[in-house]
Image (spheres, helix red, strand yellow):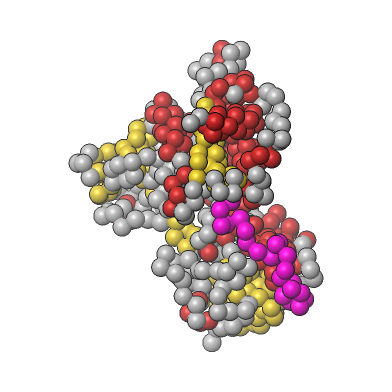
Amino acid sequence: MTPETADSWDVIVIGAGPPGENAADYAGRDGLTTALVERELVGGECSYWACMPSKALLRPAELLGAARAMPGLKEAVGPLALDVASVLDRRDSFTSHHDDSGQVSWAQGAGIDVVRGHGRLRGEKTVEVTTADGMVRTLTARHAVVLATGTRAAVPPIPGLGEALPWTSRDVTNLHEVPEAVVVIGGGVVACESVTWLRALGCRTVTLVEGGARLLGRTEPFAGELVAESLRDAGVILHLGRTVTAVERGELVEPREGYGHGGPVTVTLDDGTTITADEVLVAAGRVPNSDDIGLESVGVSPNAHGYVDVDDHMGVPGTEWLYAIGDLCGKALLTHMGKYQARVAGDVIAARAGGRALDDERFVDLADAGAVPQVTFTEPEVGSVGLTVAEAQERGIDVEAVEYDLGQVAGASLLRDGYTGRANLVIDRRRDVVVGATFVGSGVAELVHSATVAIIGEVPVSRLWHAVPSYPTVSEIWLRLLETLRQQRRTP
């Protein structure tokens, strides 16, 4: 018989990534006892395999590019390349060399217990945890269980792809050897950011294959077009509107994260083109980790896409004790949105445990309905929030859009010579409020929050006129967009 021990807490969270950590923290701030169950590293995907390592790889490339676009610096920099070893060492410092002791110390300091092992539901308010050595612990929650198990990289059913042991996002963010040639399957955020740092780190041949007609297909069309132009200028080979039909690799080795997985790999496209590379990277979406967490034991089924549906309090419909947050609920696969959902869930759980009414906006997920911010750290950066023109129209909103060349803004032109960028606002005509914004250009990431505030606050366009941007900063784009909108409205 498998040895068992029993433990109980007020709240048990399965998955100790940033959303899980936040849910436990916020529930615990009101005096509830909490436990985090984690089978890998406390801190999750973001800390070790996604946000932190990827941005640590991109920042040096961004700075070198900025220096080469600035007289006085470009002469000093000349043809110098990045010191790859130093870049990778700095990356490793941000991932704590995959040592989560610091995160565990934070949790314990916040009064959160950490339980190691794979957690799955085994009935109402019951979690079974299987440890690495096969031990089983049965945990009981007095008030709530929160599911925060995230997603994993999707590997499409392309003939030969799985057998070729492709790289995923975990390999490319934790690479220890820079391949000479890489083929990237996908054209979204992960793909575009990956090819950016691969080229900057010295990968000689980087090829990106995307089935859609443009990159970053969920953004405004001009965003993907500007990124594609920049990538081509950097030497990246783009095959847009093409699909991979077969992958073949002869020699295989035991895969180690961030190292080569075998000999040369051949990728065949639907037009007959063949590409030979050292590695093939799959960046073609994510799959929710909902398949081994015991949902069936409590009568819950994932939706058609594998995600766990939730209500506006982040609760799973049909239960009064089960919640799902982060990537698992499929609302917005972004760390900051998962942490936001966790704050909502943590507050809701604490209020319900204390018998308090949920009559405050902090107990409701408002942002996921149309105020989701995101930044793609390519060169140029793409920052967006809310709805695109197409998305707004699909929702039946009568919209008008306004665009402006960011390179014509004084603050932007001072950042670098030859500044290239564009911005737009999507405006709901009936309410006269901004429902979407996209900024493309160097340093635009910091513009996104101002647009997020305008959207979530439903600030009327007439009031935005009185938000005076500092000069000379890139924020002046707000004034230029509003001036262009005024001119559009005056023109018959």
Q: In this picture, is 434 found above or below 419?
A: below
Q: In this picture, is 473 found above or below 192?
A: above
**Residue at screen point 53% across, 15% down:** 78
At which x and y percent is residue 220? 46, 41
**Residue at screen point 42% across, 64% down:** 305
Quadrant where the image shows the N terminus: bottom right
Residue 288 showing in the rendered view: yes
* Number of numbered callouts drawn: 0
- Looking at this view, is 469 or 25 the one in front? 469
Q: Residue furthest bottom?
A: 1
At which x and y percent is residue 453? 66, 46
**Residue at screen point 48% across, 79% down:** 296
Residue 257 showing in the rendered view: no
At which x and y percent is residue 282? 39, 49
Q: Residue furthest left?
A: 272
Q: What residue span does the magenta drawing correspond to?
A: 351-377
- Looking at this view, is 83 or 445 the one in front? 445
As for residue 273 lying within the magenta part, the answer is no
Choose top left, top right, bottom left or bottom right for residue 103.
Answer: bottom right
- Looking at this view, is 100 or 359 the one in front? 359
- Looking at this view, is 320 or 402 the one in front? 402
Q: Residue furthest front?
A: 492
At which x and y percent is residue 75? 56, 12
**Residue at screen point 62% across, 79% down:** 320
As for residue 373 lying within the magenta part, the answer is yes
Q: In this picture, is 479 found above or below 355?
A: above
